[in-house]
Image: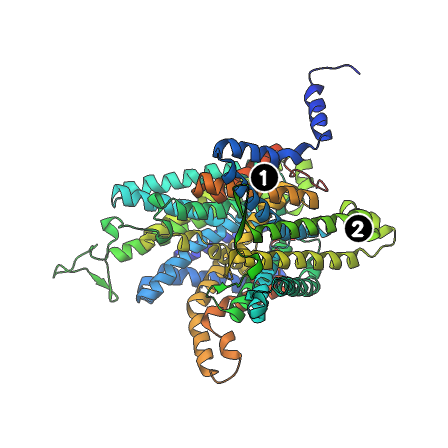
């Protein structure tokens, strides 16, 4: 094989890909930010905040991305699950009262886990209902899907307003997770560490399910070529509903986590997060869990760095990031399928 | 011949070859309704002289342009964009900022509005070329993100845009209620059928006639060869490309045209309201309104836009009153008053919308006239 100039960029790209390729983007971003910020301790705090935020966004985005990948359904109502999860989490936390705010760390954690579990279970059930009633009649029809899910989003938001009212609701944060620890001059909020760990846990679990189980194999096969899986005799529609429930549950879990992080929630929470979630899904590439994680971390880091450096540009910066990445790779960084 | 008849006449030429005779009663109803709406709007200051009705009529005029331009995208071409309020806002903010800094004058409207339209065009071109080659769903997400960034920018660059408070400004003197267009013997504004011929009337007709001109331009566009290509792209993108039409080029073109139309509607809105803020031109609620109006009226029919806007706007202004009455009447029941609370009207609208998309995906005009707007 002769080496000519035309194949050179391709060879370089192949080399980059072999060593992780786009996975180094967050590191690159962090290094650039370190140079711009200058103070390592501030930078470390921002980086950890960005990672934690990224993990919570990942929870919300991964479900959306997977649902799209497998079912070719873009659920604009996804943010309704985030909002519902946040409010249910907040309600359970408030309801448990002393469990959460008291001095017993074990009870604190149990209370928080209960709240998250309640939100997640609700998300799964609501997802089941949503898939059955709202989405099933409009498979294969993108325009009507978008319209129907937007309609469902309106209804869901109104229902949240009906039940919880329009005033912002305070979310009690478990006593054990309040405050921050100082490590080598870097102050870190404990809740952020918790959020980060939970995100990692979910990612690892999803990764294992998708790559090590028969169910995961079927899901990945379905993402790649649905007709073929159907032709082999598997009930893809049952997979659909399972994935939809899981995706909705993750969104609700992310919402509950975000509620605890914010401390004060309104019914607009879901729609506010949805913009970031969409950006993450676009950056990461539709249908890919790894892509969602990468996109979420990039977006989380970017949001925190820019909020520190140029506060007014925080959301616009992520938009610009998305534009740049779309110019470079029109299907996102790590798409599962190119359609 | 009245304006409304021109409406109907222009629309009739829209698809002459596809006229289905068996649907003539439905078509008659649609044309009749549109003619009625057109007549009502043309004589609104004389028919409904109170201030609130004037507000409703002007809003309907502006939204007909906005919704029809959105229908160019979603109904005729099959592009789902959530950035329409962004273009609307660009036109409105351009006009508002120019009127604020240059003082009330037509050159400010022309210059500021023109700048807004050009900005909308450039942005549409950028977004279109960047992302119209990918799938519909992708495009929907990109436009949604772009629109929300624009909203954040509008509220954060408060030195230029007034932030959340928006901009209040005065408009050319010709349009102020104190201006008399014609004076009677006493030197007061001449009254015709009890309506004073003052600046307010001039302003209404400025809005109405501009909206009419823009609407007729759009009905002309969809009747042109360009319109046929767009429908071909909507029906089968691959085939359109195979026949030799560059799909990306046509999509970007119509996206730019729709952006220009939306920005022009923004100018009208800004001039009528004498106020521009994120709530009235940029908010996501307005985007939802536009979407609902297009779908309720009927995607892929210009007349549907008129019907959808009129119905929705009337519902917005008057259904709430009705719901308040219902809530009062049922105040003793447990849950019902909460459900009938006027603030929850979107709940009912959302439910109605879902049912409509299920059972009548081609909307009111589309169903009656027997032509589906989209697949």
Q: Which residue of the protein is positioned furthest toward the bottom in this rendering?
A: B332
**Does residue B205 appear left or right of residue A171 in this picture?**
left
Q: Quadrant of residue A88?
A: bottom right
Q: Which of marks 1 and 2 is in front?
A: 2
Q: Residues within 10 Å of mark 1 (few under 14, many from 20)?
A: many
Which one is in front, B63 or A254?
A254
Label 2: how many Cα within 10 Å (few below 14, some 14–19, many 20+): some
| Residue at x-position 52% and y-position 34% | A33
At a point 74% along the width and 51% down the height, the residue shown is A205
Q: Indicate the position of residue B122 as horizontal and vertical percent values.
A: 47, 36
Secondary structure under tag 2 reads helix
The colouring scheme, among rainbow, by chain, secondary structure or one colour, is rainbow
Q: Can residue A163 be seen in this snapshot? A: yes
Q: Name the foreground residue: B366 vs B142.
A: B142
Residue at the farthest left position? B186
Q: Distance between the residues labelled 1 and 2?
A: 32 Å
- Whether pointer 1 and pointer 2 mark residues with C-beta atoms closer than 8 Å, the reply is no
Identify the subunit bearing mark 2: A
Q: Can residue B76 be seen in this view?
A: no
The image's mark for residue A237 is none
Residue of label 2: A216
Same chain under badges 1 and 2? The reply is no
Taking the image as shown, residue A338 lies to the left or right of residue B146, namely: right
Is residue B202 toward the left or the right of residue A269 in the image? left
Q: In this view, does A67 lie above or below A93?
A: above
Of residues A117 and B233, the one nearer the viewer is: A117
Residue at point 73%, 50% (across, down)? A206
Q: Where is residue B30 in the image (x, y as percent from the top left)?
A: 52, 62
Q: Helix, strand, or loop for circle 1? A: helix
User: Which image quarter holds the N terminus of chain B?
Assistant: bottom left
Q: In this view, does B112 lie above or below A66?
A: above
Which residue, given by chain and number where applicable, does mark 1 sit on? Answer: B131
């Amino acid at each position: 094989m002769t080496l000519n100039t035309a194949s050179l960029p391709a060879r370089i790209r192949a080399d980059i890909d072999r060593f992780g390729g786009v996975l180094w983007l967050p590191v690159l971003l962090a290094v650039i930010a370190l140079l711009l910020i200058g103070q390592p301790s501030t930078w470390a705090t921002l980086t950890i905040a960005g990672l934690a935020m990224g993990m919570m966004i990942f929870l919300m985005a991964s479900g959306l991305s997977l649902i799209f990948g497998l079912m070719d359904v873009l659920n604009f109502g996804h943010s309704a699950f985030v909002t519902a999860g946040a409010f249910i989490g907040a309600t359970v936390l408030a309801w448990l009262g002393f469990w959460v705010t008291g001095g017993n760390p074990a009870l604190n954690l149990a209370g928080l886990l209960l709240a998250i579990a309640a939100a997640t279970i609700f998300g799964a059930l609501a997802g089941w209902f949503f898939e059955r009633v709202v989405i099933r009649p409009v498979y294969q029809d993108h325009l009507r899907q978008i319209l129907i899910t937007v309609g469902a989003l309106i209804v869901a938001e109104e229902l949240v307003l009906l039940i919880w009212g329009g005033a912002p609701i305070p979310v009690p944060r478990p006593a054990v997770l309040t405050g921050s620890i100082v490590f080598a001059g870097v102050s870190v909020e404990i809740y952020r560490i918790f959020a980060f760990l939970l995100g990692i846990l979910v990612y690892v679990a999803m990764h294992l399910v998708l790559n090590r189980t028969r169910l995961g194999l079927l899901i990945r096969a379905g993402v790649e070529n649905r007709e073929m899986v159907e032709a082999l005799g598997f009930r893809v529609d049952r997979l659909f509903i399972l994935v939809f429930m899981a995706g909705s549950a993750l969104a609700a879990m992310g919402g509950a986590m975000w509620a605890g992080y914010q401390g004060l929630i309104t019914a607009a929470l879901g729609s506010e997060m949805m913009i970031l979630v969409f950006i993450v899904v676009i950056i990461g590439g539709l249908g890919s869990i790894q892509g969602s994680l990468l996109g979420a971390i990039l977006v989380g880091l970017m949001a925190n760095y820019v909020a520190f450096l140029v506060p007014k540009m925080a959301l616009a910066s992520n938009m610009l990031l998305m534009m740049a990445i779309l110019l470079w790779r029109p299907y996102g960084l790590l798409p599962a399928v190119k359609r | 011949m009245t304006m409304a008849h021109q409406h109907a006449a222009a629309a009739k030429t829209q698809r002459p070859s596809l006229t289905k005779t068996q649907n003539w009663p439905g078509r008659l109803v649609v044309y009749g309704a549109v003619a009625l709406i057109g007549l009502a709007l043309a004589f609104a200051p004389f028919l409904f002289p109170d201030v609130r009705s004037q507000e409703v009529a002007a809003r309907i005029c502006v939204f007909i342009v906005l919704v029809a331009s959105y229908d160019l995208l979603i109904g005729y071409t099959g592009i789902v964009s959530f950035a329409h309020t962004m273009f609307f806002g660009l036109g409105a903010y351009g006009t508002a900022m120019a009127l604020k800094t240059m003082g009330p004058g037509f050159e400010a409207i022309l210059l500021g509005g023109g700048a807004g339209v050009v900005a909308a065009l450039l942005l549409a071109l950028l977004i279109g070329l960047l992302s119209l080659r990918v799938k519909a769903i992708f495009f929907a997400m990109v436009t949604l993100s772009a629109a929300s960034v624009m909203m954040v920018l509008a509220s954060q660059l408060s030195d230029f845009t007034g932030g959340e408070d928006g901009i209040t400004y005065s408009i050319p003197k010709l349009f102020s209620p104190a201006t008399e267009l014609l004076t009677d013997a006493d030197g007061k504004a001449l009254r015709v059928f009890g309506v004073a011929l003052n600046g307010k009337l001039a302003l209404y007709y400025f809005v109405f006639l501009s909206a009419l001109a823009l609407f007729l331009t759009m009905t002309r566009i969809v009747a042109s060869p360009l319109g046929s290509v767009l429908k071909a792209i909507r029906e089968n993108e691959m085939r359109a490309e195979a026949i030799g039409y560059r799909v990306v080029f046509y999509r970007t073109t119509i996206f730019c045209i729709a952006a220009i139309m939306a920005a022009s509607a923004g100018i009208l809105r800004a001039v009528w309201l004498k106020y521009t803020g994120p709530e009235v031109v940029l908010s996501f609620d307005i985007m939802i309104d536009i979407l609902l109006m297009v779908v309720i009226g009927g995607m892929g029919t210009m007349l549907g836009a008129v019907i959808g806007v009129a119905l929705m706007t009337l519902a917005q202004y008057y259904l709430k009153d009705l719901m308040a009455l219902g809530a009062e009447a049922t105040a003793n029941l447990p849950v019902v008053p909460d459900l009938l609370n006027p603030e929850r009207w979107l709940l009912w609208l959302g439910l109605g919308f879902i049912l409509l998309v299920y059972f009548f995906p081609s909307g009111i005009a589309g169903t009656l006239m027997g032509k589906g707007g989209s697949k």
